[in-house]
Image (tube, rainbow, N blue to C red):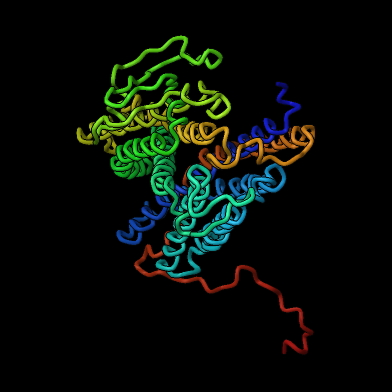
Amino acid sequence: MDIFSNTVALSRMQFAFTAIFHMLWPVLTTGMSIYLVIIEGLWLKTRDPDYYLHIRFWSKLYILNFGIGVATGLPLEFQFGTNWGPLSEAVGDFFGSVLGFEASMAFMLEAGFLGIMIFGWGRVAPPIHYLATIMVAFGANLSIFWILSANSWLQTPAGGAMVNGKFIVSDYFQAILNPFMVKSVAHMFLATLETSLFMIGGISAWYILKDRHTAFFSRSLKIILATTIAVAPIQIYAGHLSAEQVAYYQPTKLAAMESKWESSPAGQPADWSLLAIPDEANNRNSWELTIPNALGYILEFRKNLSVPVPGLNEWKREDRPKMVGLIYYSFRVMIAIGFFLAAVMLWNVVEWYRGNLAPDKIGAQKWLMRLWMFAAPLGYIAIEAGWVVRCVGRQPWVLYDRIRTADGVSNVPPNNVLTSLIFFMVVYSLLFVTTLYFGSRIIGEGPKLDLPVPGADGQFVINTEPAESVPDRRPVEAQQ
């Protein structure tokens, strides 16, 4: 099949490209906003100027990511009308409403208070500014709830039924709280937070390696470490719970995640494939390295081995995911990164306990700082890999077990879709380069340690002067 003459394949490629690119930016804003709440809370409690200077520095990267996230997110939603019209018509009563909730409740809340968070220093009282920072973080993370609720509903549709080709919702709360929702929201929330923490830690480690503001960034690194001590292991457990729900609700996806072709009967623990070369043409693995019985125990370590684990050969080719190799290795990349980040956290805990992260000693931990820099982008890779597993593994369904992907695509000429795909690739590439340029400038300039700190003399002064002085243009007589 020539994908360049296939509307379904091109529409999937376009949505995948725009989604993967867009996801890079909200990941940092959702996680970093929580970090900003922590830092500003510490500043209000201790009045330590360093915390204030941290807020001002990291806020610049937050704003940059927020702006690019908005620019790349809008075209993503427009595609439901341009490329996925039949799907939107069939599920729009619920799916469209939830996306609208995300825009009106979450994005508008974040955007509305963002202005106060950025420009409110010295213009509003510190508690009001802190409230604005909290609301920005709440709005950013509320987006996770609505987006994951909508996507989880595509994975496990609930709260209604298909009637004449259209999903009629009978219970909105049941649809919102669909079976996938809770664990998916928790898994994604922790993923964005962990990714942001390691990115902030990696940038801090870069400064320490360069011997720039070592004491300043050793403090941010310790705050990050104190937070990841809890986040990293909980995220691994949340990922396991997500895999358990896939095993229950989407067994074809689990079989693809494990490249498992033959079923394991009840009472017989399934082997776990550590590495394999899937051979879809012949419905088998041409090579694999397995751990006997491990998959059965992983899936049911809290229960009896009472249910079978089906393999891909239980389903017809047209009813199971394709690109098994992509799903299989994306899943393993995500797992490997999760455990690697937890290991980095443990190493840092040991060094902290030994006193090697003190400002006068941390500069000597060269390899540890390089490890933080290496780990900084890994969270992004894990998140993107996880979404590949989530969405490619759902195929051939766009609404699981209800609407096939091929039936949800608009009847648009392939050349039109290819043209728009090329356009997106060019524009998004320019945005990516631009973002890297301005981000590197922010990091290269570093924090401005000479900024006046509100309340440094014990008093918080509110600036009531207008931002600009407008000249009085009345006649002289009227002014007198």
Question: Is 216 situated left or right of 282 in this image?
Answer: left
Which residue occupies the foreground of this view, 457 or 444?
Answer: 444
**Vertical arrangement, residue 278 with respect to residue 374, above or below:** above
Residue visible at 31% across and 17% down in the picture: 291
**Quarter residue 41 falls in:** bottom left
**Residue 203: percent from the left, percent from the top?**
44, 37
Question: Is 427 situated left or right of 224 in this image?
Answer: right
**Quarter residue 79 falls in:** top right
Residue visible at 60% across and 68% down in the picture: 467
Which residue occupies the foreground of this view, 170 or 408?
Answer: 170
**Residue 354: percent from the left, percent from the top?**
20, 32
The quarter in which the N terminus is drawn is: top right
**Residue 349 visible, this orientation:** yes
Residue visible at 50% across and 16% down in the picture: 283
**Residue 308: percent from the left, percent from the top?**
34, 28
**Quarter residue 7 falls in:** top right
**Vertical arrangement, residue 136 with respect to residue 320, above or below:** below
